[in-house]
Amino acid sequence: MTAYQSMKAKLLPLGLYAFSEGGAVDCELKAYAAELDRLYGEIDTLYREAFIATAESYGLSERERFAGKVRDDLTVAERRALLMESEQSCYGGNDEAALEQIIHHLGITHYAIECRPRFSTLTVMLYETVSNWQLAALTKQVKAFGPVTFNVIIQ
């Protein structure tokens, strides 16, 4: 039902207005309805873009920008999956796969991990440019992930 049909259906039972095709009340309702229909469309788009599962354009880009890296090189489904994973708070382990998951969730794809227990170092070598936010988040999360006695190096 359009805004015009909805307004007309609600006003007709009141009996206060004469609705003749092309009349003043009819034209005024159509003018209001045109703008209301446009606004309803924008609200529907905003609502869709507010959730990762239904976002298709700027909703994904803005969340990715907040996370540190817009991934235009991926499909919409891949971008959604990456964002949904990155917003999970539990990584489920303390092995190399869990560390790779942390790094991947920050939008970093080209890296290598080197763990040297003998020297108490954990090194993450980055082979791509990352934002300051990604670097700070990576440093914080890797330090929290690794043993306290290890020196975390991010190159």
Image: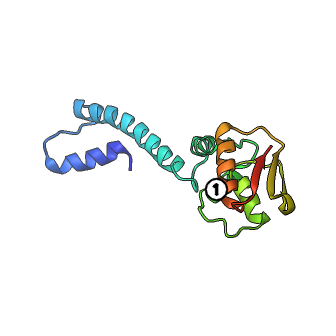
Viewer-proximal residue, 83 or 104? 104
**Is residue 36 left or right of 47 when viewed as pictured?**
left
Q: Residues within 10 Å of mark 1 (few under 14, many from 20)?
A: some
Q: Quadrant of the C terminus?
A: top right
User: Which residue is found at the position 72% from the left and 67% from the top?
Assistant: 94
From this viewpoint, is residue 22 visible? no
Viewer-proximal residue, 104 or 135? 135
**Is residue 74 left or right of 18 when viewed as pictured?**
right
x, y percentage for residue 65?
62, 40
Viewer-proximal residue, 54 or 98? 98
The residue that disc 1 covers is 86
User: Which residue is found at the position 16% from the left and 40% from the top?
Assistant: 17
Which amino acid type is marked by label 1? Answer: Ser
- Residue 7 picture quarter: top left
Task: Give the mark count.
Answer: 1
x, y percentage for residue 113?
83, 55
User: Which residue is found at the position 46% from the left and 40% from the top?
Assistant: 42
Does dot 1 land on a helix, a strand or a loop? helix
- Residue 149 picture quarter: bottom right
Residue 1 to residue 131: above or below = below
User: Which residue is found at the position 77% from the left and 37% from the top?
Assistant: 129
x, y percentage for residue 153?
77, 48
Q: How is the image coloured?
A: rainbow
**Is residue 150 left or right of 89 when viewed as pictured?**
right
From this viewpoint, is residue 137 visible? yes
**Is residue 123 left or right of 91 when viewed as pictured?**
right
Viewer-proximal residue, 25 or 143? 143
x, y percentage for residue 106?
68, 50
